[in-house]
Amino acid sequence: MLQNAGRRVISIFRSFQKGSSYVSLSQGVRPLQVPSARTLTDDVKDSPERQLFDTSLLEFLVCPLSKKPLRYEEKTNELINDELGIAYPILDGIPNMIPQDARLIRKDVGKKEEPTEA
């Protein structure tokens, strides 16, 4: 393989010496073969074995916005901040603590807001 590369370089060099203004370098070049990468959605939703969240991490994890402790909801597989009413998803056992990826949840469903007079 190294000999072929050396011969190719020598032939290109010789063509430059002859005064050729253009040499096609694409001859003999193979496309790069990259193994297919796994996407985030591959086998995550359909896998029968859902990777569980390690609840011992709740001792260390806090909400990045309010710095308050979080509650783990096993039914939805989310970390809940009851104070702000947001839920952080857990993907493959890893909590996604990015505030933009959190979803708003309804809090105080039974509580009605009373209008204030100005």
Image (tube, rainbow, N blue to C red):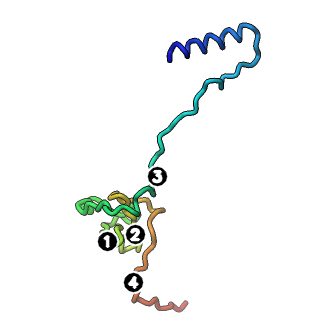
Q: Earlier in the sequence, mark 1 or mark 4?
A: 1
Image quadrant in which you'd find residue 58: bottom left
Q: CA distance from mark 3 to mark 2?
A: 23 Å
> What secondary structure is found at the residue carrying circle 1?
strand
Q: CA distance from mark 4 to mark 2?
A: 15 Å
Does residue 25 appear to the left or right of 45 in the view shown?
Answer: right
In contact (CB < 8 Å): disc 1 and disc 2 = yes
Q: Position of residue 109 (x, y in %)?
A: 41, 85
Q: Which residue is the site of mark 4?
A: 108
Measured along the vertical axis of the image, is residue 84 above or below residue 117? above
Q: CA distance from mark 1 to mark 3?
A: 26 Å
Q: CA distance from mark 1 to mark 2?
A: 9 Å
Q: Which mark is residue 73?
A: 1
Q: Which mark is residue 39?
A: 3
> What secondary structure is found at the residue carrying circle 4?
loop
Image quadrant in which you'd find residue 16: top right
Measured along the vertical axis of the image, is residue 20 above or below residue 53? above
Q: CA distance from mark 3 to mark 4?
A: 37 Å
Q: Which residue is the site of mark 2?
A: 87
Depth check, mark 1 against mark 4: the one in front is: 1
Identity of the amino acid at label 3? Thr
Depth check, mark 1 against mark 3: the one in front is: 3
Depth check, mark 3 against mark 4: the one in front is: 3
Measured along the vertical axis of the image, is residue 33 above or below residue 73? above
Q: Position of residue 92 (x, y in %)?
A: 35, 58
> What secondary structure is found at the residue carrying circle 2?
strand
For the view shown, which residue lies furthest in the left direction? Answer: 56
In contact (CB < 8 Å): disc 1 and disc 3 = no
